[in-house]
Image (cartoon, rainbow, N blue to C red):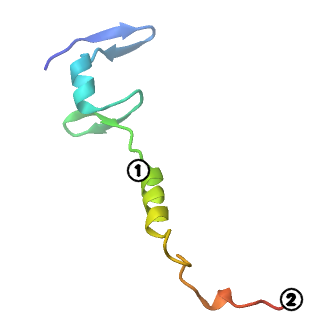
Amino acid sequence: MKTKIVRIGNSQGIRIPKPLLEEAELGDEVELRLAPEGLVIERVASHRKGWSAAAAQLALDNASDEDPFVSSEFDEEWEW
């Protein structure tokens, strides 16, 4: 797809059609980087995406266990 570079204030930009934005799942913030083939626009990585659901599932999985944690030498009573 071809598009024109347009002036936006003191900068320049491109207009990306809504269907293309939705298909690419770019969201409101993107990463820009230079590559040998040109300028690459990528969605911002969400490193913690799905953590909440995974933690909830872990809690459900461990609900029947008495102690979901692995014991170690540090679990003994300490003397000060």
Q: Is residue 39 left or right of residue 74?
A: left
Q: Secondary structure at mark 1?
A: loop
Q: Residue furthest right?
A: 80
Q: Considering the image in quadrants, where does the C terminus appear? A: bottom right
Q: Residues within 10 Å of mark 1 (few under 14, many from 20)?
A: few
Q: Is residue 79 above or below residue 20?
A: below
Q: Secondary structure at mark 2?
A: loop
Residue in the image at 15% along x and 17% along y:
2
Q: Is residue 2 left or right of residue 47?
A: left
Q: Residues within 10 Å of mark 2 (few under 14, many from 20)?
A: few
Which numbered dot is residue 37? none
Q: Position of residue 72 (x, y in %)?
A: 59, 88
Q: Is residue 34 left or right of residue 36?
A: right
Sooner in the amino-acid sequence: mark 1 or mark 2: 1
Q: Is residue 73 above or below residue 24?
A: below
Q: Residue furthest left?
A: 1
**C-alpha separation, residue under disc 1 versus residue under disc 2:** 42 Å
Q: Considering the image in quadrants, where does the N terminus appear? A: top left
Which numbered dot is residue 50? 1
Q: Position of residue 23 (x, y in %)?
A: 22, 29
**How many numbered discs sit on the rendered protein?**
2
Q: Are marks 1 and 2 in contact (CB under 8 Å)?
A: no
Q: Nearer the viewer, residue 34 or 23?
A: 23
Q: Position of residue 41 (x, y in %)?
A: 30, 32
Mark 2: which amino acid?
A: Trp
Q: Nearer the viewer, residue 34 or 74?
A: 74
Residue in the image at 46% along x and 63% along y:
60
Residue in the image at 48% along x and 58% along y:
55
Residue in the image at 41% along x and 50% along y:
50
Query: Badge 2 is on which residue?
Result: 80
Q: Position of residue 40 (x, y in %)?
A: 27, 34
Mark 1: which amino acid?
A: Gly
